[in-house]
Amino acid sequence: MNVIVAFAKPNDIQNFKSILNKGGYDSVQCYQSGVQALSAMEDLGSGVIICGYRLSDMLYSELLENMPDYFKMMMIASADKAPEEIDDKLVFLQSPIKKSDLFFTLNMMLEGVTLTRKRAKERNKTKNDEDKKTIAAAKEILMSRHHMTEPEAHKYLQKCSMDSGTRMVETAEMIISLSTI
């Protein structure tokens, strides 16, 4: 799983990278700026970013606002920097922190990211199965009412979809709704 460390001070970055490496996290990516961290997050797709209150170019809140969906943030700062609003993508740890708290929280967050991605994948699979059924039903209508073969019905759906700029399942839904009139 992907872990990014982002702090304004190079010394903080090295300290956290060293602690994480000793804890078994070998491929930790490190950055001083939020822009660099955001770019890395886009490339990686999912994971956890460990950061401070302020980076070289932005506050944690701006970084949080622009993070990809499958990333979570662990913000480590003094008590006076604690976030005012609670966000499901943000965990705040007050510094100084114990290594055990760092690793426990990081592992929980990584498991949460994995679970979120798994659920999204399952939802997409279910949706794809429903879409296939809808497209098959529209093909059946075209085959029975317009005496098309299955490949002709499929090609017709594709062409209508492209011509109208809609997804194929939306075109299929239109055909089904028009057939009930």
Image (spheres, grey):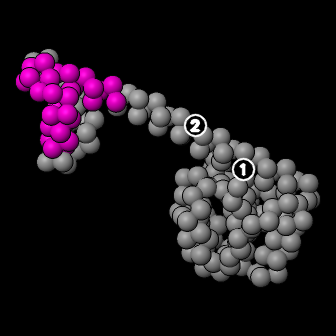
Q: Amino acid at mark 1?
A: Leu
Q: Which quarter of the figure is the N terminus placed in?
A: bottom right
Q: Where does the image place residue 62, in percent across and percent down from the top left?
A: 57, 66
Please indicate whether residue 121 sits to the left or right of residue 91 in the image: left
Q: Is residue 128 above or below residue 53?
A: above
In the depicted structure, whether residue 171 falls above or below residue 71: above
Q: Is residue 152 magenta?
A: yes
Q: Secondary structure at mark 2?
A: helix
Place residue 133 in its image quadrant. top left
Magenta extent: 132-161
In screen coordinates, is 166 left or right of 7?
left
The residue at 63%/78% (across/down) is 33
Mark 2 vs 1: CB contact within 8 A: no
What secondary structure characterizes most of the magenta part? helix
Residue visible at 70% across and 70% down in the picture: 29
Nearest the eye: 116 or 176: 176
Dividing the image into 4 quarters, which one contains the C terminus? top left
User: Would you name the residue on which mark 2 appears?
Assistant: 119
Return the disc, 2 or 1, that comes first in the chain's sequence: 1
Residue hosting label 1 = 110
